[in-house]
Amino acid sequence: MATLAIDPELNGARTAKHGGKLALYVHWPFCVSKCPYCDFNSHVRASIDQDDWQKALLADLAHEAALLPGHELGSIFFGGGTPSLMDPATVEVVIDAARNHWPQADDLEITLEANPNSSEAARFADIASAGVNRISLGLQSFDDAALAFLGRAHSADEGMRALNAAQSAVRRVSFDLIYALPGDTERGWSASLDRALSLGTEHLSLYQLTIEPGTRFATMVVKHEFEPLDSEASATLFELTQARTAEAGLPAYEISNHARPGAESRHNLAYWRYQDYAGVGPGAHGRRGGIRTVRHRKPENFLSAIERNGHGLVEEAPLTREEAAHEALVMGLRLAEGIDPAALSDRLGVEHLVDEAAVERLSKLGLLERDGLRLRTTEPGRLLLDSILAEIAA
């Protein structure tokens, strides 16, 4: 494991002891099957020893907590993989341990990602009893043919039953849908949005299908087994999504995430606002006072590292001021609220976060706008975010 000392010249905002709200991410790497579009750290195993994994996660958490004193725990997020495959008892002991390591915020948000398979949905009440107060459900589609194309292990009917179970178990529920599949049309996606907006959740994550390198979909595209939806049609569906969700009172607060005001994912806001977060479990990343942390990806390697070292870290590397500034810019401009460039520059110890001449030029083109001290992308600008970032990074 590479371990390097942090630059002593970095200001107090970059040290691990500065306090403030802390987000905790817990990665559960196991899935029933691997979806062909997924490039997350997920693995299929014939059997999982829940006791071993409970002990390993607790050890990894204790190691990270010792290096992050003085924070208030603002959120916990169980991601994956498929965290709804975790034994609810494991979920409970991890939550209890986190609460013992740090004082908790009064409105502590505890989210668990779940798949709609019937066997998992039946666990939602137990998961809620364990302390989870927000469920993020991977519906992905209301259509059985689309679910089959996406390699999902549930049917549309199972998805609806799981959503009902989630809404019965916890007050805060979000669900994911994937759009811009091959053959998607404005009419078809509009009907899906109608249904999504009628289901009464406070938060929706609406993602365009992207073909990620190394996935089965990437191989299929190379072999011309299917053709992705073209960029113009995808942009039209994106614009439709922004308009329809805003009209329904769930505007986009981030490029792909929509919520009623006050119902935004506090955990994900911590990432995008460039706050500290602890990452534990296989493949988990974290940011600890100006240091990037990475855990072993392969479950077996992670367990071996726990046994050997008492933690699952494979890398700790200090972020330079320039790296931190670039990451903060990339994250912050995904948000509808945008960024305060001067405040971020001060916090990260850089002289200039953005190229003001480029900002002025892109503002005249209607791609960026200023609101007082804040800088944000416009709706047309969000379609060109990668290009905008390349131009304005100082």
Image: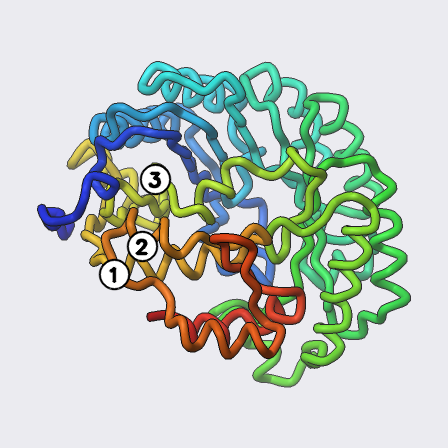
Asked where in the image residue 306 lies, by quadrant, the reply is top left
Q: Is residue 358 above or below residue 33?
A: below
Q: Which residue is mark 1?
A: 351
Q: Nearer the viewer, residue 83 or 13?
A: 13
Q: CA distance from mark 2 to mark 3?
A: 16 Å
- Comparing labels 1 and 3, the label whose residue is closer to the camera: 1
Percent x, y of residue 80: 50, 44
**Label 1 crowd (10 A; few <14 / some 14-19 / many >=20):** few
Sequence-first disc among 2 and 3: 3
What residue does disc 3 label?
A: 276
- Looking at the rendered structure, the secondary structure element under dot 3 is loop
The picture places residue 183, in percent across and down from the top left corner, at 80, 74
Label drawn at residue 377: none
Mark sitting on residue 345: 2
Question: Residue shown at 33%/70% (left/top)?
Answer: 394
**Residue at (45% x, 44% y) in the render:** 29
Tell me which numbered mark, 1 or 2, is placed earlier along the sequence.
2
